């Protein structure tokens, strides 16, 4: 089949690689326009665009996939199907109707659970025991189309969202190729999504990544892991933002500190929560490099009653 791969971030790269190595013909890539980042606000090329340029593929990067110029370009490419992996924009009906076999979206969740932009992060934060990937027929609704294939991935007790994506992206790429093979052969069996079990996974805002120390230790742990590496869990210390790497529930303490209260011990740096304390891992104070919590504590020497966050 003639394909145009639509994708933007790093988790979409394994799918592009797998399609390039498949029997299908990738004729172009659709990605989001270069973003502006850093102090100099320089243009940053998406990982998918970088690989496409290396492979000598044409790159389409419209501001909106409903733009007339883009629709004409897409029609001129005459794709049989447009596989989608984390493209990052809603696709209008006029674009959906261009390829004869539609658009097939690889989504990193077990639909209908976690429809939206951040399914893996929400699965970790919610404490799901398993997640996975689904390839489904893209519709105008938010991740509502019939499922063409899926796979299940257990969520480990210490998995971060990044850990899960590192496993889901290559496994999902294999799933996507298999689904496209079946679609070409006329052997696909779309399964409508059930009406129950729907959960939404909107993009995480910076405020969603702020740790609430009054939450139970397990919830604090899951929030930090779910926000690692992005958008990055954080709290405050002495009035400045303080980033947190994964923490670890420390178990029962005879004299547990109150929520947010720091306690530096030989075993590590403890912080109180709504239940039992957690042990800090790597931290990043404002304007500093990432460092082990014990090294940070030796440098700042927190007072006995000092806290992380706004209140103890």
Image (cartoon, rainbow, N blue to C red):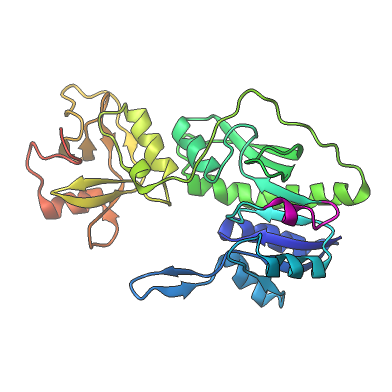
Given residues 211 and 225, the one toward you in this image is 211
Residue depicted at x 37% and y 30%: 219
Given residues 241 and 60, the one toward you in this image is 60
Left or right: 8 in relation to 101: left
Residue depicted at x 73% and y 42%: 136
**Residue 117 at x, y percent in the picture:** 54, 46
State the image quarter where residue 58 is shown: bottom right
Tell me if residue 250 can be seen.
Answer: yes
What are the residue bounds of the magenta stretch? 92-101
In the displayed structure, 122 sits above or below 17; it is above
Given residues 284 and 187, the one toward you in this image is 187
**Residue 86 at x, y percent in the picture:** 60, 53
The verdict on residue 63 being magenta is no
State the image quarter where residue 247 is shown: top left
Quadrant the N terminus occupies: bottom right
Left or right: 19 in relation to 133: right
The verdict on residue 100 being magenta is yes
Tell me if residue 267 can be seen.
Answer: no
**Residue 156 at x, y percent in the picture:** 51, 36
Q: Residue furthest front?
A: 68
Quadrant the C terminus occupies: top left
**Residue 17 at x, y percent in the picture:** 70, 63
Most frequent secondary structure within the magenta stretch: loop
Residue depicted at x 67% and y 72%: 59
């Amino acid at each position: 089949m003639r394909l145009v791969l639509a994708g933007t971030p790093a988790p979409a790269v394994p799918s592009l690689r797998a399609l390039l190595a498949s029997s299908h013909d990738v004729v172009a890539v659709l990605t989001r326009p270069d973003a502006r980042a850093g102090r100099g606000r320089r243009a940053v090329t998406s990982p998918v665009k970088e690989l496409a340029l290396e492979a000598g593929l044409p790159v389409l990067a419209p501001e909106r996939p409903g733009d007339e110029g883009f629709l004409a370009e897409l029609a001129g490419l005459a794709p049989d199907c447009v596989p989608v992996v984390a493209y990052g924009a809603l696709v209008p009906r006029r674009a959906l109707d261009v390829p004869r076999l539609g658009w097939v979206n690889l989504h990193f969740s077990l639909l209908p659970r976690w429809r939206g932009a951040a399914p893996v992060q929400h699965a970790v934060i919610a404490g799901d025991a398993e997640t996975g990937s689904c390839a489904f027929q893209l519709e105008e609704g938010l991740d509502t189309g019939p499922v063409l294939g899926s796979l299940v991935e257990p969520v480990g007790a210490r998995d971060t969202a990044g850990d899960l994506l590192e496993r889901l992206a290559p496994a999902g790429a294999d799933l996507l190729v298999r689904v496209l093979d079946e679609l070409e052969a006329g052997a696909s069996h779309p399964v409508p999504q059930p009406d129950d079990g729907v959960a939404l996974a909107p993009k995480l805002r910076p405020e969603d990544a702020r740790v609430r120390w009054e939450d139970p230790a397990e919830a604090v742990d899951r929030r930090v892991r779910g926000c690692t590496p992005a958008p990055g869990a954080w709290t405050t210390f002495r009035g400045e933002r303080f980033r947190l790497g994964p923490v670890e529930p420390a178990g029962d303490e005879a004299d547990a500190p109150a929520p947010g209260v720091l306690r530096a011990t030989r075993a590590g740096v403890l912080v109180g929560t709504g239940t039992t304390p957690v042990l800090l891992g790597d931290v990043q104070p404002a304007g500093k490099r990432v460092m082990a919590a014990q090294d940070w504590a030796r440098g700042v020497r927190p007072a006995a009653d000092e806290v992380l966050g706004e209140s103890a």
